[in-house]
Amino acid sequence: MRDQKTWEARELPRLLANALTLTPRLRRDTVSIAAGEWPDPKIQNTYLWGKVGTGKTIDAAFLWIEAKRQAFINSTGGGIMFTTTPALIAEIQNTFDSKDKSTGDVVLKYQAADVLVLDDLGSEKMSAWVYSQLYLIINYRYEYLLPTIITSNYDLDELADRLEDERIPRRIEDEYVIKHKTGKTWKK
């Protein structure tokens, strides 16, 4: 049965025990925080920004878990992805020497995810090529109204400066709930 009780008893522990889902730190921290202290679980385009250590990544991880919960209970697709921007770029770059996977395959995977959590936007070294790959993913998700949760250390003006382009920040401004994290809203 796919209900809340089954989710809590069976699926959530299995999800959090899987080393491929979240990093050990994120698994530890999400398990150690009481569910009542989790952020608002509404899955929508969300831009969480603030200084290092304010809990942006943990909030994004909770939203990722909530998206997984909703997919489980509603028996919908499981294309719910969590990655850092540098890891996404590295994955794309790894296709350069691959005969099995192309850059387009990786970009399409992130474009088409049911929900995408993109952690640390703006932390990657920016080049025109890196920007174009990020733009392909974020713009596609913007145009097709696919929920995307992004964390960054930068407000939108700072992000535009960092990216040396306004297009991604303006799309975020148009379609995202923007939350400035000034401190952790939960305690360990």
Image: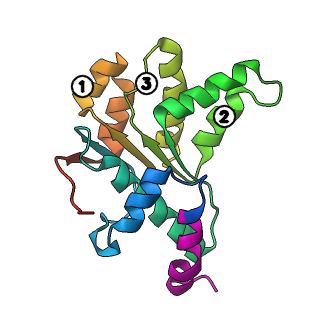
Q: Which residue is mark 3?
A: 124
* SS category of the residue bearing label 1: helix
Disc 1 + disc 2, Cβ < 8 Å: no
Q: Which residue is found at the position 38% from the left and 59% from the top?
A: 29
Query: With respect to residue 1, does 113 lie above or below?
Result: above
Instruction: Please state which of residues 181 and 158 is positioned toward the viewer in this rendering.
Output: 181
- Indicate the amino acid at tag 1: Glu
Q: Could you tell which of marks 1 and 2 lies nearer the N-terminus?
A: 2
Q: Which residue is mark 1?
A: 158
Q: Which residues are magenta?
A: 1-16
Q: Nearer the viewer, mark 3 or mark 2?
A: 3
Q: CA distance from mark 3 to mark 2?
A: 17 Å
Q: Which residue is mark 2?
A: 106
- Indicate the amino acid at tag 2: Val
- Indicate the amino acid at tag 3: Glu
Instruction: Answer left or right for 16 relative to 32.
Output: right
Instruction: Please state which of residues 131 and 39 is positioned toward the viewer in this rendering.
Output: 39
Q: Nearer the viewer, mark 1 or mark 3?
A: 3
Q: Could you tell which of marks 1 and 3 lies nearer the N-terminus?
A: 3
Mark 2: few/some/many CA within 10 Å (<14, 14-19, 20+) = some
Q: Please check the rendered image and state whether residue 4 is part of the magenta-colored stretch, yes or no.
A: yes
Q: x, y (%) of residue 83? A: 51, 42
Q: CA distance from mark 1 to mark 2?
A: 28 Å
Image label count = 3
Q: Could you tell which of marks 3 and 2 lies nearer the N-terminus?
A: 2
* SS category of the residue bearing label 3: loop
Q: x, y (%) of residue 84? A: 47, 38
Q: Please check the rendered image and state whether residue 166 is part of the magenta-colored stretch, yes or no.
A: no
- Quadrant occupied by the C terminus: bottom left
Disc 3 + disc 2, Cβ < 8 Å: no
Colour basis: rainbow
